Image (cartoon, grey):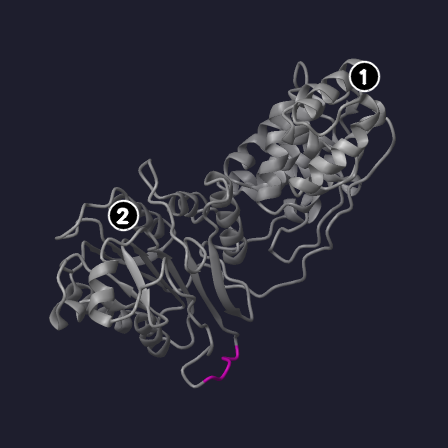
Amino acid sequence: MQFIIAFLVAWIIPSAIAANPISSVHGDEKKVALVISNASYRSVSTLANPHNDGDAIKDTLEQIGFEVSHVQDGSDSGIRKAVEAFEEASQHADIVLVYYAGHGVQFGGQNYIIPTNFDLKTSEENHAKLVNINQIIADIDKASPASAKLYILDACRNNPFSDIIEAHVGSPTKRGLARISVEEPTANGKVESDGYYKIVAFSTAANTVAEDGSGRHSPFTQSLLKYLPQPGLEVGAMLRQVAGDVVMKTKGNQKPEYMVQTSKSLFLTKSFITECDKLAADTGNFIGVESVSFGDIDAQKAIPACEEAIKLYPGSARLKNSLARAYEKSRQFKKALKYYQAAAEQGHRAAINALGVAYLAGCGMPKPDVKKGLTLIHKARELGHPESDATLTTHNVLPYISDRARTKLYKKLKALKLIKSRKQIESGLEKLQLDNDLDDNGLTLETIHFLDLDEIVPAGFKCS
């Protein structure tokens, strides 16, 4: 547990259970990828980001050892030829990855790539240009039944071709893409002796539309680019962190999801276990190492072990978080902050939570920054960190706030027309929490942050 805080009365956030041992793909096998990015359509406005998205995904995959085939602005024939060639290339691969960015459509329970030569006209010839995504997946599955497969679809933008397609098929299209079955692990339905792995990942939930983004990349691909190259990050964990990142960035408007069928864990970069992991690994490390509780960290051994591990794997957010925990245990708070910050910038949710608690308590800094601390803890919760939820919702600080703070709280609740007198503060809080789906445990940190009253958080938090 990082930056343990004690507030007037002792309390402990329970730790998650240790991760079970896992099998893995170790990152030194044959890895192939097909990247398709369509932006410049013949009949409609050019999309802002698929070219940037495709180029960046291609470069990132090549950096982590993939052989990449890239189709930019593919026509129907160009995409089909590329898929056919990729099927052959994937036959002897250990890891197969397909990424698509551009316009997509679903009807009749099937998903289709819209090629750049698709026209705004109704005809059999034009309709035949649509490329069936479900069929691509089925064909690649058949060509490489024993490989681990990952299909990533950032193809849920608003579809300007809906009217034309609906006129041709005689039934309405639906928003976004449809879920894709992940039924059989191999062509004959049998599980290979070394296990099976298949994921179909969507940039947003089925039947909803994703954002193209206002920057260089779509929100989904921007998050994917942050996590893909991180060494030793298991794919399932990566996609969960991507999803949390996108939900937070889009304020809940876009919720990525993925369909999975797997009997093992998968690493796109080389998986590794170091002495640092054995001495200071946090919960949820996804590498099969038993986590080390904060109280059990031997800082004298962990600090040099983690410093040495980071020299070998400088891009590992996991190791940076472990080194920060060791520094915190030795009460070197400024050094702990440095590594928590570095891991947090890479999206490591436990580090984000620890950094938030540090700001809340003022650990290693001149004074606390409660607003920033609570913002970071909320971010960690959005990414699925269990301890952050406990920090925000478990404890009632109402008995400990000052009279001045209580006055501010009263005025806020009164302005919201929840109460009329000071005696109604507790009932007003209950109504606020019920109306806004907040935990009803009194004046929690979650409720304080929701009310934008961070300044009323009482003093008294202490670092471990």
**In this image, 266 relative to 74: left or right?**
right
6 vs 15: above or below? above
Q: Which mark is residue 50?
A: 2
| Residue in the picture at 81% in, 22% down | 422
| Residue in the picture at 53% in, 52% down | 240
Q: Which residues are magenta?
A: 189-193
| Residue 401 in the image, given as x and y percentages of width and height | 80, 21
| Residue 449 in the image, given as x and y percentages of width and height | 65, 29
Is residue 191 a member of the stretch shown in magenta?
yes
| Residue in the picture at 57% in, 66% down | 23
Quadrant location of residue 295? top right
Q: Which residue occupies the foreground of this view, 420 or 75?
A: 420
Is most of the magenta stretch helix, strand or loop? loop
Give SS at disc 2. Answer: helix
Task: Answer whether residue 129 is visible to the viewer in this image.
Answer: yes
Q: Which mark is residue 79?
A: none
Point out the tag, 2 or 1, that comes first from the N-terminus. Answer: 2
Quadrant location of residue 366? top right
Task: Answer whether residue 397 is visible to the viewer in this image.
Answer: no
| Residue type at tag 2 | Pro
**In this image, 154 relative to 431: left or right?**
left
User: Dot 1: few (<14), some (14–19), or many (≥20) neighbours within 10 Å?
Assistant: some
| Residue type at tag 1 | Ser
How many labels were placed on the picture?
2
**In this image, 25 relative to 52: left or right?**
right
Quadrant location of residue 179? bottom left
Give SS at disc 1. Answer: loop
**In this image, 368 relative to 105: left or right?**
right
Which residue is labeled 1 in the image? Answer: 402
407 vs 210: above or below? above
Is residue 147 a member of the stretch shown in magenta?
no
| Residue 254 in the image, given as x and y percentages of width and height | 45, 48
